[in-house]
């Protein structure tokens, strides 16, 4: 009897502590604000490409170039064989001059009002090749199909960890396997990871409009066919955080925007 | 023979706990996304060539868990068929139920992407199951079955040892919560905390981490008190001095491993051995506690005699807590 009471007591403490320990700590999701500029388009209006303009720009790195961490792929002989040479994390994609930053997701965060956009039928793709995700950072649209491919002769799991959309974790043990997924809510950014190979990660920005771009190694980006208006642009980097800039675009106008990230902060100018 | 087998199950369980802690330490919990299958294969036919990188930890954990589950089935059946003490037979069944529940919790936590509550419960139940296997090994040991009239009757020791065991288990639950909520490095320095004796700022993660460090101090004090008490009051009783001494040594090792876990920025192996150390502290404290209660196990038997019919009294007297004849009381 005493023994039984002891076990019942221990089980009770387990349950109580688990409930106390795990009752909170939910973070809020990173949603962009609803478009509500004074020049908001009428509901359901489509963009008139005849008056649309462009936003171009560059993302600079202001400061010492941060180092990417070395990756050891010894745990999987296939990765070791497929990915040749020194392997580094993809956190900082820096231009040859050390002053520009790639893999930055730039998008219109606010100002589009009530424009509507057709869901693209073309398929977005992410490939697992040489034990990396390709691309590392990319954008796609709400309800656009995303094809996930395993081109490696080893197994991967693709684990998406969104906050607004549904989480999923699927295994792709055989080379050439494909699966398709759609995200039904906008979300910047949805992280992907491979739990088999801890160094593999990627990020996708899911938007309800087509105005986004990812900087190349020279830090350049271009957002085309943007209707006249005043917009808030946001530049997102996986480690350096986000920066915003405001830009006003007249009919057929083209504007330049420069973002400047510092390892300990960033500024934007236009 | 049964005692040896029970020891084998307990030893297998500590290996299972090490395997499980390696999964968490390597962040490998979702490296096999399906359950109970592994990448669509039957768990037992999943090709070894695919046990790469983090899959080695997760799939290895599943296989070791299956082995322990199988051993527990044998142990429960063996106890049911050969053990004369009715409560111990049911205790074996309870251990089997615990390991089954543990397996299901493990599956649920994978299928639901490692919810903190489920993963922490999985860690907490693992310790309870380990305690059960150690207790069965103790209850079937020659020392336990020897004449209980020589057992120590010390209410002070009973209170102290029981409190210590409860404190250790509570500390393990806090540690499990810390691990599964990612708060292991919420306070990054040791022995100071953000350069001071207490943190200069707070968050839920820092609070959990702080609770674990504070718990370590409390548990260490409790163990040192139990050790000192046993050494001063029961110096000649080896069945008490041995677990008390081992307990003191283990807690010293455990505190060292905890410090190294922080200082090494959560090296997976150091972190995992810290988890194993916690389990060993818990079960060593449990052994001391159960031995301090040994006489009360017999006292229950005496009370049973008073309430029993004349026929069963003969049965109890014959067999009581000494199953040497093999008959059931």
Image: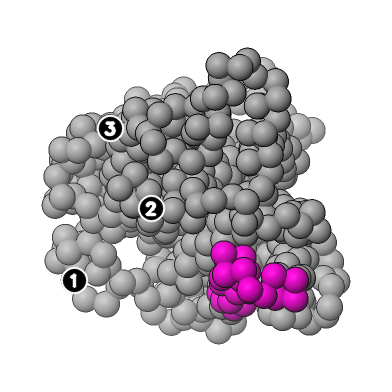
- For residue A84, which numbered disc appears in the image? 1
Is residue A259 in view from this perspective?
no
Residue A231, position as x, y percentages in the image: 68, 44
**Labels 1 and 3 in the same subunit:** no
Q: Chain of mark 3?
A: B
Foreground residue among B227 and B302:
B302
Q: State the residue position of label 2.
A: B7
Q: Which residues are magenta?
A: B231-257
Q: Tell me where residue B30 sits by quadrant.
A: top left
Foreground residue among B139 and B211:
B139
Could you tell me which secondary element the residue under label 3 belongs to? loop
Dot 1 alpha-carbon crowd within 10 angstroms: few under 14, some 14 to 19, many 20 or more? few
Magenta span has B300? no
Name which of mark 3 and mark 2 comes first in the sequence.
2
Could you tell me which secondary element the residue under label 1 belongs to? loop
Separation (CA) of disc 2 from disc 1? 48 Å
Q: State the residue position of label 3.
A: B37
Compared with B222, B165 (above or below) is above
In the image, which is nearer the foreground, mark 2 or mark 1? 2
Separation (CA) of disc 1 from disc 3? 33 Å
Is residue B292 in view from this perspective?
yes
Compared with A264, B155 (above or below) is above
């Amino acid at each position: 009897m005493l023994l039984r009471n002891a076990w019942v007591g221990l089980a009770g403490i387990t349950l109580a502590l688990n409930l106390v320990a795990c009752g909170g700590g939910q973070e809020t999701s990173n949603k962009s604000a609803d478009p509500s500029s004074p020049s908001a388009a009428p509901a359901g209006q489509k963009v008139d490409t005849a008056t649309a303009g462009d936003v171009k720009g560059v993302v600079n790195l202001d400061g010492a170039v941060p180092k990417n961490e070395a990756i050891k792929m010894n745990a999987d002989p296939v990765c070791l064989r497929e990915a040749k040479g020194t392997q580094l994390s993809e956190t900082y994609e820096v231009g040859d001059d050390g002053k520009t930053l790639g893999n930055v997701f730039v998008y219109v965060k606010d100002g589009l009002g009530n424009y509507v956009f057709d869901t693209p039928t073309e398929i977005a793709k992410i490939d697992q090749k040489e034990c990396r995700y390709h691309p590392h950072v990319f954008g796609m649209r709400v309800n656009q199909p995303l094809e996930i491919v395993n081109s490696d002769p080893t197994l991967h799991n693709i684990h998406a960890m969104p906050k607004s959309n549904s989480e999923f974790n699927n295994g792709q043990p055989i080379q050439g396997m494909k699966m398709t997924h759609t995200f039904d809510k906008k979300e910047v950014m949805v992280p992907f990871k491979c739990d088999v190979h801890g160094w593999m990660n990627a990020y996708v920005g899911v938007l309800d409009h087509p105005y986004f771009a990812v900087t190349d190694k020279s830090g350049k980006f271009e957002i085309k066919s943007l209707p006249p208006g005043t917009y808030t642009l946001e530049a997102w980097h996986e480690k350096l955080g986000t920066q915003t800039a405001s830009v006003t675009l007249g009919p057929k106008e083209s504007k330049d925007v420069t973002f400047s990230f510092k390892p300990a902060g960033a500024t934007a100018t236009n | 023979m049964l005692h040896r087998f029970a020891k084998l199950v307990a030893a297998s369980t500590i290996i299972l706990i090490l395997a499980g802690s390696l999964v968490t330490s390597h962040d490998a919990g979702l490296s096999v996304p399906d359950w109970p299958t592994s990448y669509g294969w039957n768990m037992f036919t999943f090709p070894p060539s695919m046990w790469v990188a983090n899959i080695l930890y997760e799939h290895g954990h599943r296989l070791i868990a299956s082995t322990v589950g199988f051993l527990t089935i044998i142990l429960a059946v063996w106890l049911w068929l050969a053990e004369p003490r009715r409560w111990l037979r049911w205790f074996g069944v309870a251990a089997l139920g615990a390991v089954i529940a543990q397996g299901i919790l493990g599956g649920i936590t994978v299928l639901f992407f490692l919810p903190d509550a489920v993963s922490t419960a999985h860690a907490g139940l693992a310790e309870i199951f380990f305690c059960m296997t150690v207790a069965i090994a103790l209850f079937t040991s020659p020392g336990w079955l020897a004449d209980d009239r020589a057992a120590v009757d010390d209410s002070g020791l009973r209170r102290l040892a029981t409190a210590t065991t409860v404190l250790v288990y509570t500390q393990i639950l806090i540690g499990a919560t810390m691990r599964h909520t990612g708060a292991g490095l919420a306070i990054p320095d040791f022995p100071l905390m953000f350069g001071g004796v207490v943190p200069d700022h707070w968050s839920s993660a820092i609070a959990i981490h702080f609770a674990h460090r504070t718990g370590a101090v409390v548990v260490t004090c409790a163990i040192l008190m139990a050790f000192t008490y046993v050494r001063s009051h029961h110096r000649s009783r080896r069945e008490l001095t041995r677990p008390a001494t081992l307990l003191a040594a283990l807690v010293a090792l455990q505190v060292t491993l905890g410090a190294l876990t922080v200082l090494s920025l959560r090296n997976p192996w150091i972190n995992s051995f810290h988890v194993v150390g916690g389990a060993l502290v818990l079960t060593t404290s449990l052994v001391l506690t159960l031995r301090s209660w040994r006489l009360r196990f017999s006292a229950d038997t005496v009370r049973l005699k008073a309430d029993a019919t004349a026929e069963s009294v003969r049965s109890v007297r014959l067999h009581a807590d000494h199953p040497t004849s093999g008959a059931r009381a």
